[in-house]
């Protein structure tokens, strides 16, 4: 009979058997060590934990205890640091290394409000990412025309504002764009966000 532990992962409580707990602890420690040189290490690991928690919730459903099988499946999805070393690339090497630019938006699998490109609530930007539309201006025009042409644009927007969650983590942002929310992509997204933030701060100082 295995012992079990109560843990908090990504803000969610789980019960996990002792063998899986030890492996999970080793896995998270290996990620912290791998990303230790990154400015966004803490945020990267936190977002990875949040994504792992989502995957555990999907697998458990009626079961209560996270098993080694569950953990191995989740780690296979997320990826391991040694895999990045074998590829000869760092998971947080940025958009240039990944070959993705900000206009490479694919049809998303989850609908979120996009906080990074919003005029009001990020609904239009989130919808454009979900539908695979490159520029959210077209969605915004639809709402404007619906409002002035038929007087019906406000209510749908408010409803979406209420029911559609905001993309809070890098995993959410990846799901919004239809990209795999694994270790490599999460790390890259966090690094990009930090670079963009640094650039915005630098530009503000230049203006002054």
Image (cartoon, rainbow, N blue to C red):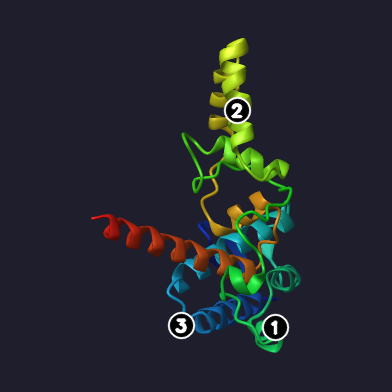
> Which quadrant of the figure contains the C terminus?
bottom left
The residue at the far front in this view is: 207
- Whether pointer 3 and pointer 2 mark residues with C-beta atoms closer than 8 Å, the reply is no
Q: Quadrant of residue 77?
A: bottom right
Mark 2 and mark 1: Cα distance apart in space: 44 Å
- Left or right of 48 in this view: 181: right
Q: Mark 3 highlights which residue?
A: 37
- How far across and how far down the image is residue 156, in percent? 60, 22
Q: Mark 2 highlights which residue?
A: 141
Q: Which mark is residue 83?
A: 1
Above-or-below relation of 56 to 166: below
Q: Is residue 8 visible?
A: no
Identify which residue is drawn at 34% across, 59% down.
203
Nearest to viewer (mark 3 / mark 2): 2
> Which quadrant of the figure contains the N terminus?
bottom right
Secondary structure beneath label 3? loop
């Amino acid at each position: 009979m295995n012992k079990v532990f109560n843990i908090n992962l990504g803000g969610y409580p789980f019960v996990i058997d002792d063998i899986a707990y030890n492996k999970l602890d080793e896995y998270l420690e290996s990620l912290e060590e791998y990303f230790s040189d990154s400015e966004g290490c803490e945020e990267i690991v936190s977002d990875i934990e949040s994504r792992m928690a989502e995957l555990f919730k999907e697998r458990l459903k009626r079961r209560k205890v996270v098993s080694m099988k569950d953990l191995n499946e989740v780690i296979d999805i997320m990826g391991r640091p040694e895999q990045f070393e074998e590829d000869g690339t760092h998971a947080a090497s940025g958009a240039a290394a990944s070959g993705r630019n900000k206009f490479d938006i694919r049809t998303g699998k989850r609908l979120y409000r996009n906080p990074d490109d919003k005029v009001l609530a990020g609904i239009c930007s989130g919808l454009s990412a979900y539908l695979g539309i490159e520029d959210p201006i077209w969605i915004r025009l639809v709402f404007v025309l619906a409002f002035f042409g038929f007087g019906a644009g406000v209510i749908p927007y408010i409803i979406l504002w209420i029911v559609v969650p905001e993309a809070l983590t890098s995993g959410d942002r990846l799901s919004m764009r239809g990209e795999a929310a694994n270790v490599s992509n999460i790390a890259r997204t966090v690094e990009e966000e930090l670079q963009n933030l640094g650039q915005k701060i630098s530009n503000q100082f230049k203006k002054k």
